[in-house]
Amino acid sequence: MHKVKGVVVRAKNEPATLETVLVPDPGPGEALVDVLTCGVCQTDLHYKVGGVGDDFPYLLGHEAAGVVSAVGEGVTEVEVGDHVILNWRAVCGECRACRRGEPWYCFNTHNATQKMTLEDGTELEPALGIGAFAEKTLVAAGQCTKIETPLQDEQYAAVGLLGCGVTAGIGAALNTGAVKRGESVAVIGCGGVGTAAVAGAALAGATTIIAVDVDDEKLETAQRLGATHVINSRSTDAVEGIRERTHGNGADLVIDAVGVPDTFMQAFQARDLAGRMVLVGVPNPGTVAEIPLDEVFSHGGSIKSAWYGDTLPSRDFPMLVDQYVLGRLDLDAFVSERIGLAQVDEAFETMKSGKVLRSVVEVSR
């Protein structure tokens, strides 16, 4: 048993506090990971406010990089000393999706069997099965994706972000949206996920990349990461602006990285004939958008949602790390500030201001 510090939220809307956490040694199929870095993601805030469930207390954090310090019986994916990115899609290999060759849709992803606890024995529910706002965490070995490419110590903050938000955005463009070279792409909403979708579109070879947001600073960041055009939708109608920048046609692919009815309809209406639309912004429970079925039929194309960017970590993480090292994917741009474990609750407030792409916890040793 390992006694470490971790960030816990005990009840809905309570502050996230630094607590003593007891972490078991790994059992069969499990890995113990010394956490190096962990991004502060919107999903962690959803856990804090009860938007994911009510299985409090939660051990927050999931967007992480670390080093494997111990493995349990039967583990072959990683070994002690491996640098890894943690992921929440440890595919089972046996469900319907896995059997039909689409493991990125796995319906039975693995998590650690044993529970981490508070000192009084209260079991903790780790965010997305990871719980990485901690000095150590216990995960299913399949949640560890080995980093083969040598990195500098300061680079793990950026690479760890591939564990969730950055990959969700990039994957929405590369995987779900299947961007082709020379296509036009519009991204509505340029927070961390939307800006990553812009970067993904650039990586795929799109030649017209339109970033839409209400914040000029976010639009400037989107330009640095590959946007060729920007639209502030406070002053310019998003649909008209996208059409104007695509010769009146609309974009081949429009990505909604917000997930509210207005932006969903903007994305639907801003597509070219037979164009594609991807929803990657997470709607609040109960959100409803009405779409005229005659327009769905007459317009053609497709409407998809992106689960984790349809990402298969074992396939996609190594490729994206290589693109980062080669200078083709600027992951460093997503690291807005580096903080300690004790500053996570403050980082949630900073996130609400919209002035950061990611605050990243660096775990001191």
Image (spheres, rainbow, N blue to C red):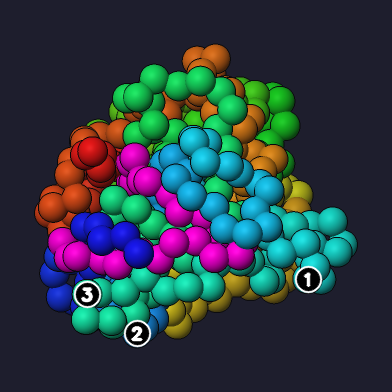
Residue 144 visible here: yes
Q: Residue at x 25, y 34 (%)?
A: 336
Identity of the amino acid at label 1? Cys
CA distance for labels 1 and 3:
36 Å
Disc 2 designates what residue? 54
Residue lying at the far top of the rendered structure:
326
Span highlighted in magenta in the image: 18-43
Give the SS element for disc 1: loop
Disc marking residue 119: 3
Secondary structure beneath dot 2 equals loop
Tag shown at residue 95: 1
Neighbour tally class for label 1: few under 14, some 14-19, many 20 plus, Cα within 10 Å: some
Magenta stretch holds residue 34:
yes
Label 3 is placed on what type of residue? Glu
Residue 256 is covered by the magenta coloring: no
Q: Is residue 120 left or right of residue 74?
A: left
Q: Type of residue at label 2? A: Asp
Which of marks 2 and 3 precedes in the sequence? 2
Q: Residue at x 26, y 66 (%)?
A: 21
